[in-house]
Amino acid sequence: MTTTSIDTMPDGRAETARAAHALLLLARFGREVTVAVPPALEQIGRGNTVLRVFLAIDDEAGSTPSEIAEQLGLDRSVVSRSLARLDAMRVLQRRVLRGDRRFVRVALTQRGRAGRHEYIGLMNAALRRSLPLVDDWVSAIDEWTGTAAFASSTPAVDREGPGVTVETAAVIDLLAQAGEDAVKAFVEVEKAVGVTGWEQRFALWVAEAHGSATAAQVAALLSMRSTTASSALSRLRAAGLVEIVPSEGAGDTVTRYRVTPRGRQLIEQHAIILKARLPRFLQGIALIPFVVTEFDRVG
């Protein structure tokens, strides 16, 4: 990929490019761990509240809706709707307590346990694949913030020592919470400038992190179709967030896009949002090696 070195950019532009690089690597990590769900869980989808509720159900004793709501920090009504959907999928069963239908404990069915076991296996494989990307992201964060942010978030335990148990579901939920919160904030600031989808957001980050980018480069970095990347860049151009780089000669037929000052202002807002949530992301990221190691030990 043809790129402009961040170190050769003017100070203001370099700061935005470093932020875009950190945002882009986090986006790529999210794409990497968005794994295909097992057949039993296809109706849940990916990375939504129903999946979080499903993963929070105690596999041994079961859980009450109130316990799940408290554990996940969700409204009880949200948990109830999610449980109703899971019940319809036949992955959980309800047991009335004390003969009063107001008091219910839910537990996974055999279908639910099998689906969760398979999903956790898929997620652990995705987390293992993502380890090099995580290392790159940590380096990008330290370069962007100018601090060793990750070191202060790493659990104070010996990675090789005995007794380290970190549940995959807990780490998934921690990262999902941080991601959902950040996305909501991204969407709010994007409404004012005409960005209407994650594809446009990610394409903007690619163009800024690399100085400029083609649709093919955006597609390759984000594992999306070229037509999707082209559409995202066209929409960004229509919104005045990117512009076409002038051709360097008659033989230069590839269309390249670079971020405009208006686009950089949006990235700066994205960066503020990420910085505010960085401790939560780093906490989850720091636990990934423990999750993978523990899964290998007991799997």
Image: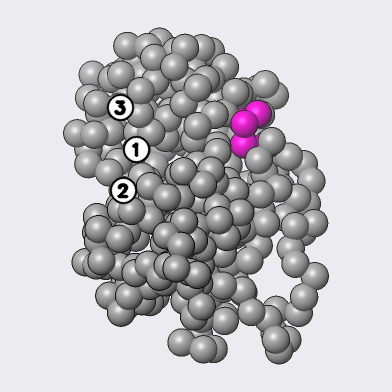
| Mark 1 nearby-residue class (10 Å; few <14, some 14–19, many ≥20) | many
Give the answer, above or below, for where 82 lies relative to 250: below
Q: Is residue 82 above or below residue 35?
A: above
Q: Which mark is residue 232?
A: 3
Type of amino acid under label 3: Ala
For the question of whether residue 133 can be seen, the reply is no
Residue 79 x %, y %: 46, 50
Q: Which residue is mark 2?
A: 223
Asked which secondary structure carries label 2, the reply is loop
Place of residue 233 in the rendered image (x, y in percent of width and height, measured from the top left) = 32, 24
Check disc 1 and report its element: helix, strand or loop.
helix
Q: CA distance from mark 3 to mark 1?
A: 10 Å
Image quarter of the N terminus = top left
Secondary structure of the residue carrying numbered label 3: helix
Give the magenta range: 271-275
Q: Overall secondary structure of the magenta stretch?
A: helix
Q: Taking 179 as reference, is 147 left or right?
A: right
